[in-house]
Image: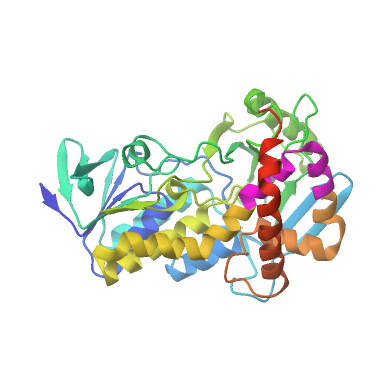
Amino acid sequence: MQRRDLLVIGGGPAGAATAIRAARGGASVTVFEKGAPGRDKVCGDGLTPRAVAALAELDISLDDAHRIDGLRMIAGSTRRELPWPERGRFPSHGAVWPRRRLDAHLIDAAAKAGAEIIHKTEAIPVLADGRVVGVEAGGRQWRSDLVVVAAGAPGAVARMLGAERIADEPFGLAIRTYVESPRHADRLLEASLAMRAPDGTPIPGYGWMFPAGDGTVNLGVGALSTMKGFRKLNLNKLCDLYRDLVAEEWEVGPYLERPRAWRLPMTAQKRHGTGWVAVGDAAGLINPMNGEGIDYGLESGMLAAELFLDDPASTPARYDAAVADRFDGFLRTGRRFSFLIGHPTLLRSGLRLAVGTQGMANLTLQVMGNLVDSETPGTAGRVLRLADRALAVADPVLRRTRAAA
């Protein structure tokens, strides 16, 4: 049996950020990643300005990433090209960084900071009297003061700890592939908001073209579980439909790989307990209005590490309170909003409102860019708080009248 200060299950951005910050602070850390070195993670690959800020805080260079200066939003005949805000807490640029390269860069940084990285090994928490005391992996056991769960979408670890998603809350599904395009070096992300399923049903979600700057573009589509007919939605057909929609304008070639789908958890029944915390996707920290979670993963991982370095024993409770204060209001509003736009008529009205004026489009940009939270000042912060109160009143009705999934 081996002893470490901190054990991390999962080597994606959230787990790597935890390990980097904790190891640089002097803690002994082991990260267990079930994938092989250089493994890919199905993702849109987009980094918001918030994610760029988090990577800067970790001293991670973005030289290998493709810079993005804003977002092109398309809803029917309306197009708006919006630069990321110049003033605010976050930089005025984002990036596209394919996950096989981003994740490898982050896990290498964790190793350079002093963390031990064990690949191709699945770790399972070890419990004693209801407390997580370590992990079992590869036939061996490790003990630690804290286990950080960064294993992504809920699976075996979440089931053991009672950290699965909340069943009656929204979640998302997305699918992506890569295509070649002469526009691979565009400096704008593109989001088509007025998507329809193959049967014509409006989709609360969007199609995207995220230029990677390396000859390829990440092409994908995502949808929320609140839409009518969600269970019958064929993501492969939807991806083909979207490719046909953008093929001429982007001059795309054939798919470079088979489109791959993934689930986007947007809640967790628990994100902490005695001896453990969950970070990133494992904690349900995904924006329901865009499916983005890399920035929240990086921030929550750093937060968990900082609290651990300060006082390991009180970390789980303090971490949960800090995450609640920073993120819960915005994410709750997003989940309630997803029930609203699950109604086709309300979705069409909402799209017209979202891009109808420059002011509303700028606000939509901040929401799509994860630039809004409990600390946001000014108009965006006020609108968020008003929306949260209004949707709290409407939420019971929206849930009762939701379309059959």
- State the image quarter where residue 397 is shown: top right
Q: Nearer the viewer, residue 362 or 120?
A: 362
131 up-or-down from 180: above or below: below
**Lateral position of residue 208 relative to residue 316, left or right:** right
Residue 184, image x and y in percent?
Answer: 68, 49
**Lateral position of residue 60 relative to residue 46, left or right:** left
- Residue lying at 45% horizontally and 52% vertically, measured from the top left: 280
Give the residues in magenta: 334-350
Residue 180 seen in the figure: no
- In this rendering, the count of numbered labels is 0
Residue 221, image x and y in percent?
Answer: 66, 38
Residue 79, image x and y in percent?
Answer: 84, 53
Q: Nearer the viewer, residue 255 or 5?
A: 5
**Lateral position of residue 149 relative to residue 171, left or right:** left
- Residue lying at 61% horizontally and 59% vertically, measured from the top left: 370
Quadrant containing the C terminus in the rendered view: top right
82 up-or-down from 211: above or below: below
Magenta part mainly helix, strand or loop? Answer: helix
**Residue 337: in magenta span:** yes
**Lateral position of residue 196 relative to residue 67, left or right:** right
- Residue lying at 37% horizontally and 55% vertically, measured from the top left: 16
Residue 218, image x and y in percent?
Answer: 62, 43
**Residue 278: in magenta span:** no
Residue 81 seen in the figure: yes
Task: Give the colouring mode of the picture.
Answer: rainbow
Which residue is the extreme one toward the right? 77
- Residue lying at 33% horizontally and 67% vertically, measured from the top left: 307
- State the image quarter where residue 250 is shown: top right
